[in-house]
Image: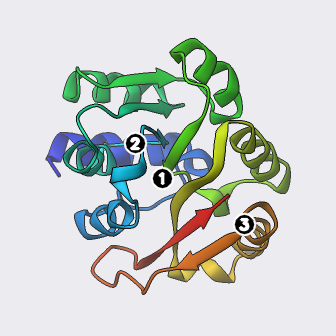
Amino acid sequence: MAVREYSRFIRESLRKPGRVGAIAPSGPRLANRMVQWIDWETVDTVVEYGPGTGVFTSEILKSKRPESRFFAVELHSEFANALNEQYPDVTIIEDSVANIEAICQQQGVAQIDAIISGLPWAAFSDQDQTVYLDAMMKVLKPGGQLVTFAYLSGMVLPAAQRFRAKLNRYFGKVEVSPTVWLNFPPAFVYRCWR
């Protein structure tokens, strides 16, 4: 990651710690683990939630089929602007994922096959977690996948435990990857099927 992206991440983290929800940007090994868990041959539409500095965006672009639809939803204008510069061929929508149904309508997308999320779920209130998951269920097709991650150290937090329990309620099947120890901080990946 370039110094400019790292400093942008630190600046946003300090300005909005509860919304950025991390002490460092995700690393390439975590990004690789995230995209490895998608069956790209079956994905016609993929959406990235909270791309931040774009580490997952880069891996998605390397992995998806050329004809697959891809867009990202980023709430922070500084990140969204930087992503638009870095990835001019990717549609970056500056909005909340709570509005994903309207965003999909604007994009001409009926249903999403896969969502790759960099959102800080453990930093969200119970209400926010529910709002975002409810909105997701309106557009994620049956059999569709959510791939997201959590920090190992964060699992002691009530919000992280609550989110894990919600995943089991919202999704028919949830898998957890081995820990990605070479990420800072160490993290693991959730793979969820609707």
Q: CA distance from mark 2 to mark 3?
A: 23 Å
Mark 2, residue position: 52
Of tags 2 and 1, which is closer to the observer?
A: 1
User: How is the rendered protein coloured?
Assistant: rainbow
Mark 1, residue position: 118
Left or right of 91, for residue 5 = left
Which residue is found at the position 72% from the left and 44% from the top?
Answer: 132
Q: Residue furthest left?
A: 2
Of mark 2 and mark 3, the one earlier in the sequence is 2
Of mark 1 and mark 3, the one earlier in the sequence is 1
Q: Residue furthest top?
A: 106
Left or right of 16, for residue 6 = left
Relative image position of residue 161 (x, y in whole percent):
74, 76
* Amino acid type at image mark 2: Gly
Which residue is found at the position 73% from the left and 68% from the top?
Answer: 172
Q: Secondary structure at mark 2?
A: loop
Q: CA distance from mark 1 to mark 3?
A: 15 Å
Of tags 2 and 3, which is closer to the observer?
A: 3
Q: Are marks 1 and 3 in contact (CB under 8 Å)?
A: no
- Seen in the picture, residue 121 relative to 187 is either above or below; the reply is above
Disc assigned to residue 167: 3
Q: Are marks 2 and 1 in contact (CB under 8 Å)?
A: yes
Of tags 1 and 3, which is closer to the observer?
A: 3
- Seen in the picture, residue 110 relative to 170 is either above or below; the reply is above
Q: CA distance from mark 2 to mark 1?
A: 8 Å
* Amino acid type at image mark 1: Gly
- Seen in the picture, residue 58 relative to 85 is either above or below; the reply is below
Tag 3: Cα neighbours inside 10 Å, few (<14), some, or many (≥20)? some
In the image, 180 versus 43, the foreground residue is: 43
Relative image position of residue 23 (x, y in whole percent):
43, 62
In the image, 157 versus 63, the foreground residue is: 63
Relative image position of residue 115 (x, y in whole percent):
52, 47
